[in-house]
Image (tube, rainbow, N blue to C red):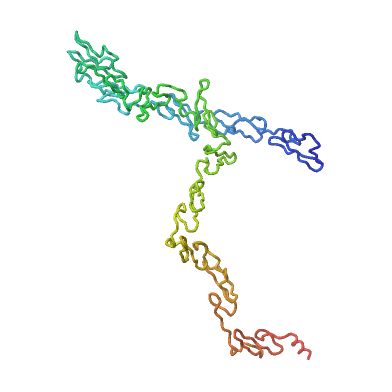
Amino acid sequence: IDECSLTTAPCFNGGICVDGINGYHCRCAYGYTGPRCETVLSACLSAPCMNGGTCSNAGTSFMCQCLPNFYGNRCQFEDKCRSVTCLNGGRCATTNFVAKCHCQPGFTGTRCEIPSNSCQSAPCQNGGTCSQNGVQFICHCPAGFVGRQCEQPFCSPNICQNGGTCQLVNNQITCICLNGFQDACASNSNVCQNGGRCQLVNNQITCICQNGFYGDRCQFPNQFSCYPKCQNGGTCNRNTRICDCPHGFVGRDCSIGESCASNPYVCQNGGRCQMVNGQITCLCQNGFSGDRCQFPSEFSCYPKCQNGGTCNRNTRICDCLQGFGGRDCSKRDPCASKPCYNNGQCRVQNNFNYVCVCNQGWTGKNCQNIIRSCSSNPCLNGGLCYPNGNSFICNCRQGWTGQTCDIQTNPCTPNPCQNNGRCSSSVPNGFTCNCLNGWSGTICTERIPHPYCPSRPCLNGGTCIQNANQLRCRCLPGFKGTYCEGKHSCLMLHNLHL
């Protein structure tokens, strides 16, 4: 009687009823126990939470409440950046589970605590003296030079005409004119564009342009300059004509400050940074977790599977589609393209290269070269080569076989020993014959001569008879044996009764 069919749903929570003798038992699903699978097992019994995490049941699974500085579904990972404070706008990032501060321009040190010395590059020209001002520098120019880097001679030669006096006003060369004359540049203060400096040359307004601009009014960006001009310490990329911006700024001219942009290393392992409610949030790639995507998921494959590969949760190595291989399926199967010609067999090697096993008559890396007769001496171990059309035939020495005489055979097959001799292959690349009595030689072909009857080998009066290959003794009554050395027992008893 099937006990399981007589009872309605005897096993709870997905348990399977198994019929037995005079009863049944329930085979419970994962996470349940009891006669009818009615009891939920506590997933916390195995203490899965690490590093002091607190375990709580969540259905048939568990949830870990981690201590500060620890993350992961089992609290198995430590966030090193939680205990690191980067100063002066620096941002912490974890690389290979080591925390490191990435500093803003103008600062250095393990915690970005040291201002960079911008005077180290000696920016001041013509003998100017450099001093540090925060993260910037100031040049103190000697007499006769002006400009941010003391690059401009002061009133030498005197550019002011008609008796005008050359003076330095707001760090710019200015002409103080006599009555009846005026400074054409002063009355046309905006004539030079893009930071160009106005001066009179032969009573004509001339613009001295900043680097990156040209034209009579400095209105055109140079062919290799960035326009708009780079801001906030950005540098012009001559190839793209777009500014390469420092940390914290984006845009064509580095004019846009952005929270995510100011933290380029905040999201790790390909995570994407976005602002949510004024806070930096990282959207992680598949296989990573954590507020900065710093932790590989427990059941993920790393590197991420490519070319349609699927992650094996047990091995954490990708199962690849046909034609691909490697831990992440990034390597193409070198044999998928059938590189071996002329029906050669392709075999994959450990380094994911291939080797071609060529058919008879072909050679080369891809079996592309025909073997011309016997010129390449293909027959090994003393074999003789005979041309056979575009191929060859090897006549192998005894003990060798195979297409090129490369396979050693059993030297005792067939048996080379004559006259029922026994063959042994114990000798390397050869054999030894154990000959029967009366025979000797390498293959037992030499007969050993027997002793002649004149030596009187027969005892007790026996008569010696010699044949071609052997001798025998004809014994007297009462004696036996090869040489008549034994006596018959019956005759001995007969003599005792007489």
Front one among 357 and 180: 357
The quarter of the rendered structure image containing the N terminus is top right
Q: Is residue 474 above or below residue 177?
A: below
Front one among 194 and 39: 194
Q: Residue at x 52, y 39 (%)?
A: 307
Q: Is residue 409 above or below residue 122?
A: below
**Which percent across, then down, holds residue 238?**
35, 29
Residue 479 occupies quadrant: bottom right
The quarter of the rendered structure image containing the C terminus is bottom right
Front one among 352 and 316: 352
Residue 7 occupies quadrant: top right
**Which percent across, then down, holds residue 162?**
17, 13
**Which percent across, then down, holds residue 118?**
34, 26
Q: Is residue 335 above or below residue 142?
A: below
Q: Give the side of residue 379 with respect to residue 198, left or right.
A: right
Q: Is residue 168 visible?
A: yes
